[in-house]
Image (cartoon, rainbow, N blue to C red):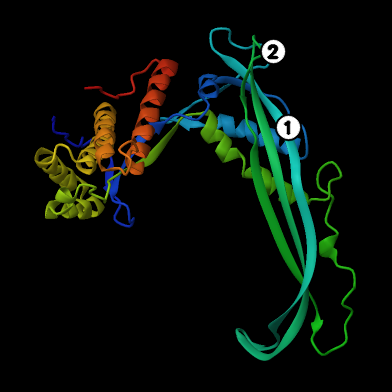
Amino acid sequence: MRKTVLASAVSIAALSACSTPGIEYETRLMPANLDAAATRNVAVERFSGPGSRWYTRQFESMLINTVFDGQPWFSMAAYADPDPKVQSGVYGGVIDIVDYEAWDDYRVVKKCIEWDGLFDCETRAEVEEICFHDSVQVAVTPRLIELGTGDILFNETYYGDASSSVCEELGIVGETYDRHRKSKHRHHDFGFLGLSAPRDLIIEALSETLSPIRRDIAPRNAIVKAEFIKEAYDPVVAADLRFEQAVDLGLKNPVASCTLWQSLAEAYPKSPAVIHNNGACAEASQQFGDAQALYAQAADLSLAFSGDGQTVAKPIRKALEAISSQRFGLEVLEDITGEPTGDPVF
């Protein structure tokens, strides 16, 4: 087995504060929608629905400020004059209020009603308050239409939630006061398009949808974790004190841990946990081809330790699926940009 050397150029850190040992590293991640990522020359038409004017401006700003590898990912195109040499599209969409609730209730709290000085309360009393609550959920369905063909390249729904509560004093318990007097807090403006939900609450809920959309339509630079498996599966390997030592080092000193995992692989070449953890070391050094091969080997080896002989251990399957998806994404990224992704395959 080729020994994996952690590249010094890669930023690697042990996850000392986490219960799962592993190594953090910087990498590039492609989004869920590859067609949207490939459509880099874009325009934005106005969304429809509550808050459409505000949301359209924010959506366009999100596209303009989408940065990958330190460079803007999207170019804002003229709607009527797209560049015929590149894939172009127009974003638009629909905004809906899924749910809005408003209710009030009463509560009694103990408050200072007379001060003798700064931070010096002279008299405390029970005060009754009326509290007004608002809760709203919005749904935004952005779509991306390719110019020239009219094909819908992206069409997903995202949800956002926001709530607020404000309380108003009615009077001191035991004294006479009007519990049913009018309150300014229930007479907010009527939001967008005559809806009862407050405008600021709708905007807050809409704001929640922008980050998930950005993650789904453009690549991003991210810090991810290559996780070590703590369970040995093989009782013989579990009895070797070096296994537990390597797991502990995975929380403190990942380079030393990887050296020990390589040593264990020489002693236990058919141990799924040991082979998997060598794969994690390869992944952290961005040797994704090696990592995928080691994870696949570990998956095959884990079958012997499953109850039915057919089920791959969950953490091994998860790592294999993730690295396979990541490598495919990097291949697509290379096709889009024309630049090598730096993913060597051995």
Q: Measured from the top left, where is residue 309 in percent x and y?
A: 30, 38
Quadrant location of the C terminus?
Answer: top left
Above or below residue 95? Residue 248 is: below
Q: Which quadrant of the structure image shows residue 280?
A: top left
> Between marks 2 and 1, how big is the CA–CA gap?
22 Å
Q: Nearer the viewer, residue 80 or 211?
A: 211
Residue at 39 percent of width and 31 percent of height: 28
Residue 164: in sight, yes or no?
A: yes
Residue drawn at 9 percent across, 41 percent down: 267
What residue occupies the far top of the structure in this picture? 84
307 is higher (above) or lower (below) than 150: below
**Which label belongs to residue 94?**
1
In the picture, measured across the screen, residue 214 lies left or right of residue 15, that is right
Whole-percent x, y for residue 91 in the image: 65, 25
Residue at the (69%, 84%) spot, across then down: 110
Q: Nearer the viewer, residue 273 or 95?
A: 273
The 10 Å Cα crowd at callout 1, few under 14, some 14 to 19, many 20 or more, is some
Q: Is residue 162 above or below residue 159?
A: below
Classify residue 95 by image quadrant.
Answer: top right
In the displayed structure image, the side of residue 260 where residue 304 appears, left or right:
right
Q: Looking at the image, is mark 2 or mark 1 nearer the viewer? A: 1
> Given the image, on which type of amino acid does mark 1 rest?
Val
Left or right, 5 with reference to 305: left
Label 2: which residue?
Answer: 80
Q: Secondary structure at mark 2?
A: loop
